[in-house]
Amino acid sequence: MTEEARKAIDLIREGSHIECSVEAYYLEIRDELIRFASDCADSNDTIRMRIALAEVNRLDNEHGYGASAKSPDELT
């Protein structure tokens, strides 16, 4: 896990929103947030799981993640 992803997960644990660049989100943070949500689900921590997934949804919308989004190569 990268330092950027670790900081993002710490922010989720504190109940804060994640502020990150598009590149960091695509390359590091998104996958780790989904893993964190999965780990929370496995340990029956549904509140943190929902918070993490809500943050993924918010960041997806903010950074245009999805079928209509630019590819990571076009982010610069």
Image (tube, rainbow, N blue to C red):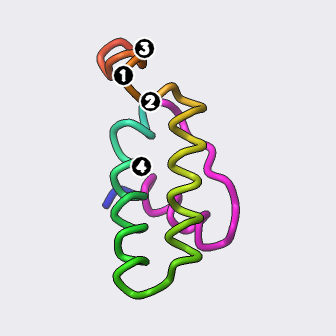
Q: Secondary structure at mark 4?
A: helix
The type of residue carrying mark 3 is Thr
The type of residue carrying mark 4 is Ile
Q: Disc 2 designates what residue?
A: 65
For marks 3 and 2, the one nearer the N-term is: 2
Quick one: quadrant of the C terminus? Answer: top left
Q: Is residue 46 left or right of residue 33?
A: right
Residue at 63% over, 44% down: 19
Q: Report the Cα–Cα distance between label 4 and label 2.
A: 13 Å
Residue 30's disc number: none
Instruction: Please identify the residue farthest to the right as the structure is shown.
Output: 16
Q: Report the Cα–Cα distance between label 2 and label 1.
A: 7 Å
**What crowding class fits label 2: few (fewer than 14 Cα within 10 Å), some (14-19), or many (20 or more)?**
some
| 62 over 19 or under it: above or below | above
Relative depth, front residue between 62 and 5: 62
Query: At which x and y percent is residue 45?
Result: 50, 83
Residue 67's disc number: 1
The type of residue carrying mark 2 is Tyr
Write down the quadrant of residue 68 in the picture: top left
Q: Is disc 3 in contact with disc 2, using a CB cutoff of under 8 Å?
A: no
| 62 over 6 or under it: above or below | above
Q: Report the Cα–Cα distance between label 4 and label 3.
A: 18 Å
Q: Give the magenta range.
A: 3-22
For marks 4 and 2, the one nearer the N-term is: 4
Query: At which x and y percent is residue 41?
Result: 40, 77
**What crowding class fits label 3: few (fewer than 14 Cα within 10 Å), some (14-19), or many (20 or more)?**
few
User: Is 14 in the magenta?
Assistant: yes
Q: Secondary structure at mark 2?
A: loop
Q: Secondary structure at mark 3?
A: loop
Quick one: quadrant of the N terminus? Answer: bottom left
For marks 3 and 1, the one nearer the N-term is: 1
Q: Disc 4 designates what residue?
A: 29
